[in-house]
Amino acid sequence: MSEPADAVSVVETDSRLETILSCRDLSVAFHMDRGTSTVLNGLDIDIERNEIIGIVGESGSGKSMFASALLDAVVEPGVTSGTISYRPTEGPAVDVLDLSDDRLRRLRWEEISMVFQGALSSFNPTLKLRGHFVETLEAHDYDIGRGMERTRELLSDLYLDPERVLGSYPHELSGGMKQRALIALSLVLDPDVLVMDEPTAALDLLMQRSIVSLLSDLRDKYDLTMVFITHDLPLVTKLADRIGVLYAFELAEVGTTEEMLTAPTHPYTRALLNSTPDIESPLEEMRPIDGAAPDPVNVPSGCPYHERCPIATDDCATIKPVMEAASETHDVACHHREQVDEIELTTGVDR
């Protein structure tokens, strides 16, 4: 017998109520003429309720695919596999990748919302901002009056004049105003989780820092869980409780922000920190990462970072490292994590 259209697939998850999203063996692949392009490869990660977790890595490391996968929004012909267990505030956990179309539509925006990369151009230029909010509320059968009250509150929380913004066309707002309005739009249906894919990439440094500060306030006021995806390591350290580092479509290291800044245990994380500009350090101490990230069709065997790693051995080229605990709050996939101090931290990021 076929499953009813609104049926929910219940999954077994960690019994700890603080875990809101749990990914296991999460992968995304595109089958192409030249081979299978694996752009996310077997991610295991737990995201805790009300935390802000930053996901960082070089361009092409799989960050955006991870964001899309969390909402089962990878475009065809991409194939997403594994499990994403979501535990709502009430009721049993569900597997996001096994929901009916109707249930998935309700999950998006209402429970897990997203600010996509390049979202500054996502507004309909012929529609005033009020129309965007009303359309979203109507599409999810929300009370328009109550929804617009929440809209005004959110816009005010983001230091915007609600009436001016709602009465404006997108082109009449600055980039920073549009980005903040988009964040308000993503929160209008009161989701539990907000996923942000490079939400500040098109903004100047001052506006980036301003929005990061506002996001922290929103998390506290609305009990939000946030997944902040960026290539900008210094920026995310101002916001995140934990940081996960992606390399070659896999997690290399996950830990508290403090641990990742002061005691990174994966050579790639150290290389990222050493390549980060620091106005207090001499320019010659900044060390770009030699080499290039691997092709998703041809990821090397063993540790995917071994071809660029200064402490790699023969084992690194043939044996794939597994995630192991470096501390109670810090996991790393590296054969030589105990020797990683051989890679000096020459520059750093102040939290």
Image (cartoon, rainbow, N blue to C red):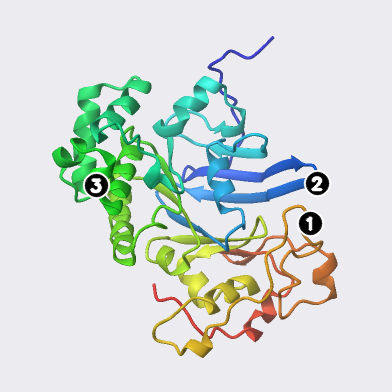
Q: Which residue position is annotated with label 1? A: 298
Q: Residue at x 82, y 64 (%)?
A: 319
Element class at badge 2: strand
- Mark 3 = which residue? 173
Q: Is residue 326 visible?
A: yes
Q: Quadrant of residue 114?
A: top left
The amino acid type, in three-letter code, at marker 2 is Gly
Asked if residue 28 is positioned above or below residue 340 in the image, the reply reads above
For discs 2 and 3, the disc positioned in front in the rendered view: 3
**Quadrant in which residue 1 is drawn:** top right
Q: Which residue is mark 2?
A: 35
Give whichever of discs 2 and 1 has the lower sequence position.
Answer: 2
Q: Residue drawn at (71%, 68%), measured in percent from left and top? A: 305
**Label 2–label 1 contact, CB within 8 A:** yes
Disc 3 marks which amino acid?
Leu
Sequence-first disc among 2 and 3: 2
Q: Nearer the viewer, mark 1 or mark 3?
A: 3
